[in-house]
Image (tube, rainbow, N blue to C red):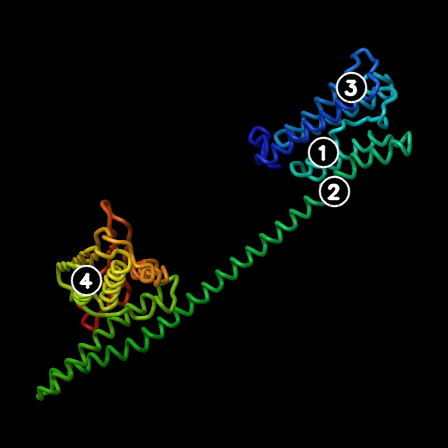
Amino acid sequence: MAERAGHRPLWPSRSDGFWLVFAALAFCGLDVVMYIFDPPTTGALGPAAGLVLQLISDLSLILLFRFPAQVAGFVVVVALLMLASNLFTPGLLVPVDPVVTSRTVPTITPVVLSQLAKVLDRRTVLIVAGILAVIATRPWQPSWNITPFGLLSTALPAVVSLYFEARKQLLRSLRDRAERAEREQHLLAEQARAEERRRLASEMHDVVTHRLSLMVLHAGALGVTSQDDAVRGAAEDIRREGALALDELRDLVGVLRNGANLDARTLSPAPTGDPATLAEESRSVGVPTELSVTGDPSQLSPTIARTAYRVVQEALTNVRKHAPGSSATVDLRYHAGGLEVSVRNTAAASPPDPALAGKGSGAGLAGLRQRVELIGGRFDAGPVPGGGFRVGAILPAYVPTTEGAHSDPGGRGR
């Protein structure tokens, strides 16, 4: 209703347009049949004056959704003309003695009133329905042949249509409120989880990190002051393992503070090891696999190294499942800013084994993407020209956190 007529579509939908055109043509046919059986009009406008007026009213229904106020006003004007003809010039627009009870509103009136509630406000619809009800029932001439039929063709369709429209709006309002409440509940739950993650991260940072840092420092001091080679070796082992633990702990704290969608699979440690082992395993089962390593892998934090390992492992597993007879190339490029991982395979030489290909859950690549993006990396996977498939990831050197950027008691070295 807030739309101007110039911007309102002719019909809300194709089905509404079909229904309006069908109704308009059906009532045109009904009026033609009534004209055949009714006596002709006898006024100066000719014997078909009433039929022409009825047909124009019927066809105006097609424009109801585009120009609702104009169509309602036109129907009221036609009804007033028919009433004037009936009162002052019988036979001009309405036959003097029609077969059907004397009519003073257009035949299409019930349909117009039933549709106006969808496009006009309730007050306007009630005013239009009230005027037409007075014209149709002619309360100054009460009659059992006129009043009931007048109410059925005016008041009843308007009231029923307004009721169903109000019910529809109520249901829509309740549905919107329920959806809004559900969204608010979801946001509150997300906020509570975020607060709990931040609390847990703070506890780990304030307590565990502090204790591990002290342990690393004491082990380093013991290695410097002790004269016993065995003690110095053990102290160095403790210092090194403690430093690695600090690295992983800082990354985990950063994930807890920055992660938005954490679950058990995301936080659980991925398999760790050397990607060369994965390439060798792939070759041992008949998949020719070439491994290319550039740069120094020691600059990566343990969390990033595990993620890279997981990317290579999942990609080679998919090659064995879905591309039998193909060869694979694993390219690892280490640099100061992190690591670029690329696993590419050629086109399959034969169809995959249905039992093997259908064994997975289908969530492997999606899980990899989540894991990579969670630590600030980028992930892509898809077919390559000429056949085959590529899985790639660009990973940072470490999970970016304020702890890792401003303090490094564990010897992170970055």
Check contact, mark 1 vs mark 2: CB within 8 A: no
Q: Which residue is mark 4?
A: 286
Identify residue type, mark 3: Gly
| Viewer-side residue, 323 vs 291 | 323
Residue 404 point in image, percent of width and height = 25, 66
The residue at 70%/26% (across/down) is: 58
State the separation of the CA atoms marked 3 and 4.
Answer: 91 Å
Identify residue type, mark 2: Val
State the separation of the CA atoms marked 1 and 4.
Answer: 76 Å
Tell me the quadrant of the picture where the C terminus can be found. Answer: bottom left
Graded by Cα atoms within 10 Å as few (under 14), some (14 to 19) or many (20 or more), the crowding at tag 1 reads some
Check contact, mark 2 vs mark 3: CB within 8 A: no
Residue 50 shows which numbered tag?
A: 3
Residue 111 shows which numbered tag?
A: 1
The residue at 17%/57% (across/down) is: 331
Graded by Cα atoms within 10 Å as few (under 14), some (14 to 19) or many (20 or more), the crowding at tag 4 reads few
Identify residue type, mark 1: Val
State the separation of the CA atoms marked 3 and 1.
Answer: 19 Å
Relative height, residue 229 to residue 283 (above, below) = below
Tell me the quadrant of the picture where the N terminus can be found. Answer: top right
The residue at 19%/81% (across/down) is: 238
Q: Single out the mark in the foreground, 1 or 4.
A: 4
Q: Secondary structure at mark 2?
A: helix
| Viewer-side residue, 89 vs 107 | 107
Q: Quadrant of residue 93?
A: top right
Whether residue 185 appears in this view of the structure is: yes
Q: Quadrant of residue 281?
A: bottom left
Q: Which residue is mark 2?
A: 160
Q: Secondary structure at mark 4?
A: loop
Q: Quadrant of residue 103?
A: top right
Check contact, mark 1 vs mark 4: CB within 8 A: no
State the separation of the CA atoms marked 2 and 4.
Answer: 75 Å
